[in-house]
Image: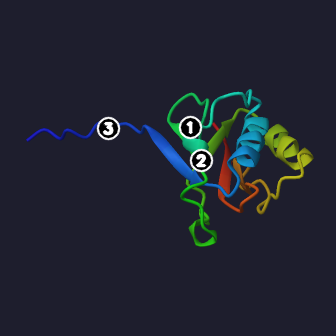
Amino acid sequence: MKSPVLNELGGIFIPVSDIEKARDWYCDLLGVPNDGEIPFGHLYVLPMEGPDIVLDSKIYAPDRIIKSPLIQFKTNNIEEAYDYVKSRNIEIFTEIQHGHFFNFKDPDGNHLMMCRC
């Protein structure tokens, strides 16, 4: 039987404590407008190319913080991306590894990765 499940991602959910604060932080990181709607008062879909990132304050709890990077943001220049993230006073918890990637945290402590593509 052929699987009815498509071989593609639709979205990745990130638990956040404050939807507006998270929206503004992620939009600033990505350099995109923060003018989208917040459906149901707890969701924000980041305007991405590829799978959507869905910020969700309804699923937030301190024990649901993502402690291993599940999301890899892409960059063409890892050093420039590192300096950019650092200039925004974002907590970076690894140096650039193997000239290829580094890990950092969002305001709720979710672990994220930046990777040279």
Task: Estimate the x, y position of residue 74 in percent, counting from the top left.
Answer: 65, 38
Secondary structure of residue under mark 2: loop
**Circle 3 residue:** 7
Q: What is the three-letter code of the residue carrying label 1?
A: Pro
- Relative height, residue 103 to residue 64 (above, below): above
Q: Residue furthest left?
A: 1
**Circle 1 residue:** 39
Say whether disc 3 or disc 2 marks the residue closer to the N-terminus.
3
**Circle 2 residue:** 42
Q: Is residue 67 left or right of residue 78?
A: left
Which label number is shown at residue 8?
none
Q: Nearer the viewer, residue 95 or 64?
A: 64
Measure the alpha-carbon separation of dots 3 and 2.
Answer: 28 Å
Say whether disc 3 or disc 1 marks the residue closer to the N-terminus.
3
- Relative height, residue 77 to residue 89 (above, below): above
Q: Nearer the viewer, mark 3 or mark 2?
A: 2
Q: Quadrant of the N terminus?
A: top left
The local crowd at label 1, few if under 14, some if 14 to 19, many if 20 or more residues have their Cα within 10 Å, is few
Residue at (76%, 40%) from the top-left corner? 24
Q: In which quadrant of the rendered view does residue 111 lie?
A: bottom right
Secondary structure of residue under mark 3: loop
Q: Quadrant of the C terminus?
A: top right
Residue at (71%, 27%) from the top-left corner? 35
Q: Are marks 2 and 1 in contact (CB under 8 Å)?
A: yes
Measure the alpha-carbon separation of dots 2 and 1.
Answer: 6 Å
- Relative height, residue 34 to residue 101 (above, below): above
The local crowd at label 2, few if under 14, some if 14 to 19, many if 20 or more residues have their Cα within 10 Å, is some
Q: Nearer the viewer, mark 3 or mark 1?
A: 1
